[in-house]
Amino acid sequence: MNPKELIERMKQEDDKNAKLKSKIYALEQELKRQEENSAHVIFKDTTLEELEKIWNKSDENQRYDIMTYIPEIKYQIDKLDSHGGLRSGEIEEEIYSKKWNESEWLEPNYEFYFEDYCKKV
């Protein structure tokens, strides 16, 4: 293969890689959009009062599952982690071990994070 052919082949490979990167980016954006919409789908038929009862009867693993659908909670925990002190995992453990609104880490209250996703009374 002569240098000219090699350069042409490299350009073709670069084009393929650019297209692949573009597809990956589009898929990542779609996944992010679906994750953000999943909280609306999951909690749309649940009131805040019902969610509080569910939370208080749930174990830590179930509470973790509930929290993972709310992007604002992850943002809040990451923000607290960035200030030093407790790490995000330690903050999460403390949140999951407490009853509804008993953790000091989610301010002003749990309703603040869920009200946009839950059924209005």
Image (spheres, rainbow, N blue to C red):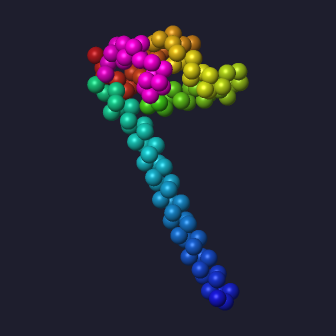
Q: Is residue 66 above or below residue 34?
A: above
- In the figure, is residue 64 to the left or right of 117? right
- Tell me what residue is drawn at x 34 percent, y 23 percent: 118
Q: What secondary structure predominates along the stretch shown in magenta?
A: helix
| Residue located farthest toward the right when viewing the structure as drawn | 84
- Report if residue 88 lies within the magenta region: no
Placement of 117 over or under 55, stated as above or below = below
Q: Residue at x 47, y 59 (%)?
A: 23
Q: Report the number of numbered marks.
A: 0
**Residue 106 appears in the picture as rendered:** no
Q: Is residue 72 visible?
A: yes
The front one of 61 and 13 is 61
Region of the chain picked out in magenta, as a range: 46-67
Q: Quadrant of residue 112?
A: top left
Residue 77 lies, in percent from the top left, at 58, 26
Residue 110 image position (x, y, % from top left): 46, 17
**Position of residue 91 measured from the top left corner of the image (x, y, whole percent):** 60, 21
Q: Quadrant of the C terminus?
A: top left
Q: The N terminus lies in which quarter of the figure?
A: bottom right
Q: Is residue 60 above or below residue 26?
A: above
**Residue at the (53%, 70%) spot, across then down:** 16
Left or right of 45 on screen, residue 62: right
Q: Does the magenta run of residues contain 51?
A: yes
Q: Provide residue 113's location: percent of width, then percent of height.
A: 46, 22
Q: Is residue 98 above or below residue 35?
A: above
* Residue drawn where x is 42% and y is 13% of the image: 56
